[in-house]
Image (tube, rainbow, N blue to C red):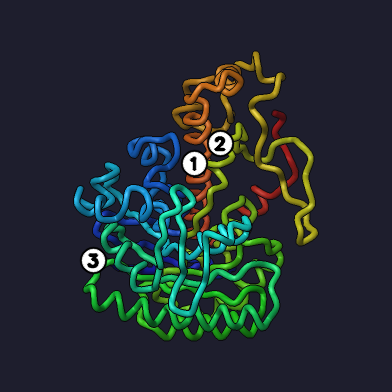
Amino acid sequence: MFKFEILHQEKKTKARLGKIKTDHGEIETPAFVAVGTAASVKSLTPQEISQTGTQIFFVNTFHLHFRPGEKIIKKLGGIHKFMGWNGPIISDSGGFQVFSLAREKEINLVKITEGGVEFRSPWDGTKDFLTPEESIAIQKDLGTDIILCLDDCTPYPVTHKKAEISLQRTHRWAQESLKAYKKLKSKQALYGVVQGSVFKDLRISSVKFISSLPFAGIAIGGVSVGESKKEMKKVLDWVGPLLPENKPRHLLGVGEIDDIFTLVKAGVDTFDCVMPTRLGRMGQILIKNPNSKIPASPAGRQNPKFTYEITKTKFAEDKRPLDLQCDCYVCRNFTRAYICHLFRSRELLAYRLATYHNLYFINQLMRQIRQAIKENSLEELEKEWLSKPTINI
């Protein structure tokens, strides 16, 4: 049974400490949601995913529908048995793939209509028509714990008129998703999606509409498609006060270090991002306050750069761990020199070790954030993390 409860409300911000209960375990919030597109957090086993402190992760409805197919996954016992993960799993609706394929100018693969989206598989050209009803049916067959209704993710930049048309479509699809959900008698937790681009009136209209429907939780979309950090914060400021207090809130596709503090302070309970795993595979190691150049953010303030590149020559003989402050399996057992060697030799273990560390790093930050909320000291922790660089790498 799905249940959400608030354990503590931070006094100085809108941040809240909570717990989401699912049939496959509990999630302490605020929580980071790792991205496991094809039922796999790339390079890690389920055991390793758990060891990093990851409580829940996303699987991709669009990708799993085409490969291997939801019917096969259902036949094999559902997504949890299929991939050997006993914890909570959330699935998207396939809506973001409409946006991403169109953004990549794969127009021949996507055609949006009022009734749904016509897809053509980027792998074999197989044609399909994804409706709100079919998206719910696919996710039911997958057997994930939390599912999302199909939405129309607006690109950025976009005119107010086009954003409004897109928003009306998202709202219609939300209603159709609920009808399909009830018809199929799904026991999964269904989240509605708030859209509206960077327009205040559209965002307010959307959050009021989606909040009025009987969703188990609310997801906020369209804030990671090109908007600045300043615009993202504005959207959260508009939407946050109008969201139901008793329902969990998920922010889609956001998760850089400074963003995490922004979204948590705005009252977001869970969020997903490819950042730690993708950077890991690129040899970018997460570390707190490295002594390197600090780029200016779009909002105009200075943010520490939280990564360094392990493939550089200076690390070829470095006996130190990736992060001197980290106690993860990788930092306790391997040197920078060894991991530098792995990347330069294109050994697969390189991606595994770097991904493990980066996920552990993010989850350790989330533990600190949850403790700070409990102690009403979140802003102090934010200052500590976003302070000037202090660690030589």
The amino acid on which the numbered mark 1 sits, given as a three-letter code, is Leu
Q: How many marks?
A: 3
Question: Are the residues tagged 1 and 2 within 8 Å (C-beta)?
Answer: yes
User: Which residue is at the front of the view, 151 or 261?
Assistant: 151
Which class describes the residues within 10 Å of circle 3: few (<14), some (14-19), or many (20+)? few
- Residue drawn at x 46%, y 67% is 118
- Disc marking residue 359: 1
Question: Are the residues tagged 3 and 2 within 8 Å (C-beta)?
Answer: no
Q: Secondary structure at mark 3?
A: loop
- Residue drawn at x 57%, y 32% is 325
- Disc marking residue 1: 3
Residue 283 percent coordinates (x, y):
60, 31
- Disc marking residue 280: 2
Q: Secondary structure at mark 1?
A: helix
Which class describes the residues within 10 Å of circle 2: few (<14), some (14-19), or many (20+)? many
Q: Quadrant of the C terminus?
A: top right
- Residue drawn at x 65%, y 25% is 311
Q: Quadrant of the N terminus?
A: bottom left
User: Which residue is at the front of the view, 155 or 219?
Assistant: 155
The amino acid on which the numbered mark 2 sits, given as a three-letter code, is Gly
The amino acid on which the numbered mark 3 sits, given as a three-letter code, is Met
Question: Are the residues tagged 3 and 1 within 8 Å (C-beta)?
Answer: no
Res. 277 in view: yes
- Disc marking residue 194: none
Q: CA distance from mark 3 to mark 2?
A: 35 Å
